Image (cartoon, rainbow, N blue to C red):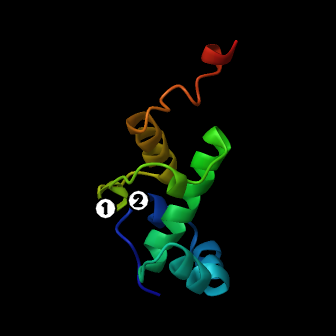
Amino acid sequence: MSTSTNPWIQSKHGPLLEKMVTEHGDALKERYHTEDVFFALWLHALNRAVQRRVLVSFDDLEDWDYWSAYDAGQSPQEAALEMLADNGWDDAYDVDVIG
């Protein structure tokens, strides 16, 4: 299996990563409109991080340069926080704002 230079992808253990690629890779590539299965997995993790914070998909927010964040080595969580801040949701994960 080829690999990615993204540190987050590299941190995933071989068998777990291989299982994700085998079981979900094609569906994720189709869902996220990419031929790069590792980028698709990264986008899936980013989307989950966004949904946990603001209850919407990253697709529902303004476009953002996801590929540059992936290519620069950001984790999906780091990219999600930066993307949310750029979209005006920088306090979406700050509990003190709520109460």
Instruction: Indicate left or right for 17 with 9 as reference.
Output: right
Count of marks placed on residues: 2
Tell me where residue 92 sits by quadrant: top right
Which amino acid lies under the numbered mark 2 shown in the image of this protein? Answer: Pro
Q: Return the x and y of residue 30 as percentages of the image width and height.
A: 53, 81
Say which element carries label 2: helix
CA distance separating discs 2 and 1:
10 Å
The residue sitting at 64% across, 80% down in the picture is 24
Q: Which mark is residue 7?
A: 2
Other residues around mark 1 within 10 Å, as few (<14) / some (14–19) / many (≥20): few
Residue 23 vs residue 92, the one in the foreground = 92
Say which element carries label 1: helix
Q: Is residue 46 something one can see in this rendering?
A: no
Do labels 2 and 1 touch, CB within 8 Å?
Answer: no
Q: Return the x and y of residue 36 as percentages of the image width and height.
A: 41, 79
Q: Is residue 8 something one can see in this rendering?
A: yes
Residue located beneath label 1 in the image? 71
